[in-house]
Every structure is written in structure tokens, then in C-alpha cells.
Amino acid sequence: MQETIEWFRNKPKSEYWLILLSGSHIGYFRVFYTSTHSIQIGADLHPDFIGRGIGGKAYINFAKNILVKKNVKHCTLKVLKTNLLAYHFYKKLGFKEINESISDFEKGISVVGLISLE
């Protein structure tokens, strides 16, 4: 329990933003502020909407807005190494792999650490 309390006390500032399509919630973006001008971004989309071109448009629009509004200079994300669909999606959007690591948070699952768009 103490570990959980410490994690919440020390976790980066975060925000969550809904992804809407015709007024319906179909997913969300999460943003963790890792420094004044640096964020880690992620998203989850309902499975019914994956593969329809919605995620790419949502990522591009969201990234443009958040980068400008928050004066962000550096944007990173993490993706599970085994999630090839997401990995290739991010590469198609222009993200580049900068390292691969094992994260304690993912309980030892190998992840492609930070895929960075600079």
C-alpha cells in the first residue's frame, strides 16, 4: 500500500482527454508532463474503431493542439514490444524508436521504451 501512495505522490502531472466521434466517446488520450516542455503521450481507442483511420487523424489533431497550447518541445510515448499493430501505427505517424527497455511498471514485459518524435 505504501508503494502505491508513494507512486501517486511522485507521479508526473497528467491529463486525460476524450476522443469523440459524432458526440460519442470512442477513446481517450493521456498526457504525462515529464518536464516543463516535455510530455509522454498515449491513447486508447475502442476496438470497434481501430483500423478505420480515426486514430491517425485523432493523434495528428491532438498532437498539433497540445504541442502548441502547452508549448511542448519534446513528445515521447511507450508501446509494448508485442503490440505490433500499435508499433507500426506510431512509426507510420512519424515516431522513431530511440530505445528498448524493460519497465518495472509493465511487470517485466519487454517494451519498446521510448519512441520519440522530436
Image (cartoon, grey):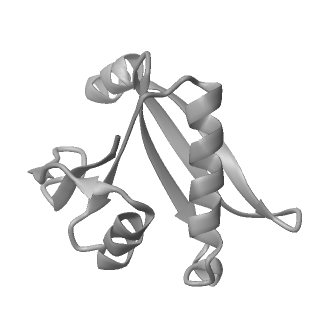
Quadrant of the rendering where the C terminus is positioned = top left
Residue at 34% x, 56% y: name it. 95
Foreground residue among 109 and 5: 109
Residue drawn where x is 35% and y is 18% of the image: 10
Q: Nearer the viewer, residue 82 or 77?
A: 77
The quadrant where residue 96 appears: bottom left
- Up-down: is 99 above or below 12? below
| Image spot of residue 19 (x, y percent) | 70, 57
Work out whether 51 lies above or below 34. below
Left or right of residue 91: residue 100: left
Q: Is residue 3 above or below residue 58?
A: above
Up the image or down, 16 lies above or below 69; here it is below
Q: Quadrant of residue 73?
A: top left
Image spot of residue 38 (x, y percent): 40, 27
> On the rendered structure, is 41 left or right of 23?
left
Q: Quadrant of residue 51?
A: bottom right
Give the percent coordinates (x, y) of residue 105. 24, 45
Quadrant position of the N terminus in the picture: top left
| Residue at 70% in and 51% down | 18
Report the side of 110 relative to 10 (left or right). Answer: left
